[in-house]
Image (cartoon, rainbow, N blue to C red):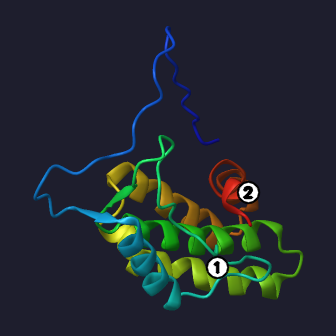
Amino acid sequence: MLPVILGGCATAGPAPQPPRPAPGATDYVTADRAVTEYRQAAAKLTLAPDWHWPADPEPSTGPDGAPQFYQLHAATNDAQTLWFCSWVDRYSTATRPADRRSALASMRKLTGTYLYTQGSDAPAQALFRTVLKEAENGSVALVRTFDDQNCQPLKR
């Protein structure tokens, strides 16, 4: 079973503000640049059947209506996450062995992505390796749990 951590605050306060880069910061990009980055990453990936790339992948304004900024490479992570999740979902819902094998072949490509190599910390990489190992061993249960907890909210 995968752990779920819930957090909360004892008192209500203002909603958290989206990130705002400091003047001269080079590790944040505008929403337009994030959308370009997302689409460049998506162009190199194929989603599983019944999954679709969003028309507007990165909102241009935050909840406060101010311009939204993104950490450099966050959009690449977002695109690769959607891609990986599409194949996790395909694996966990496949009824035919050939569909499951095809999904696993795509899932295995994760370890060569920015999401895995640089966009994830050690615990996340370990979780990804566990999901891949379970899928390779034919264990659908853990892959389905990962899908339910991490991927279903992304399905479009």
Which residue is disc 1 drawn over?
A: 104
| Nearest to the observer: residue 29 or residue 46 | 29
**Residue that extends furthest to the front in the rendered view of this protein:** 65
Q: Quadrant of residue 101?
A: bottom right
Q: Is residue 24 above or below residue 97?
A: above
Q: Nearer the viewer, residue 97 or 65?
A: 65
- The residue located at (51%, 24%) in the rendering is 7
Q: Quadrant of residue 143?
A: bottom right
Compared across the picture, whether 41 is left or right of 106 comes to: left
The answer to whether 63 appears left or right of 100 in the picture is left
In the image, what residue type sits under mark 2? Arg
- Report the residue at 52% width, 58% height from top: 130
Query: Left or right: where does residue 99 sit relative to residue 10?
Result: right
Residue 114 x %, y %: 35, 74
Image mark for residue 144? 2
Say above or below: 44 vs 107: below
The crowding category of the residue bearing disc 2, from other C-alpha atoms within 10 Å (few below 14, some 14 to 19, many at least 20), is many
69 relative to 35, above or below: above
Which residue appears at 62% of the width and 52% of the height?
Answer: 150
Residue 8 position, x and y percent, is 52, 20
Q: Residue 142: percent from the left, percent from the top?
A: 68, 54
Q: Residue furthest right?
A: 95
Does residue 143 appear left or right of residue 10 in this picture?
Answer: right
Number of other residues with Cα within 10 Å of mark 1, as a class: few under 14, some 14 to 19, many 20 or more: many
- The front one of 142 and 75 is 75
Quarter holding the N terminus is top right
Identify which amino acid the numbered label 1 is placed on.
Leu
User: Of marks 2 and 1, which one's residue comes earlier in the chain?
Assistant: 1
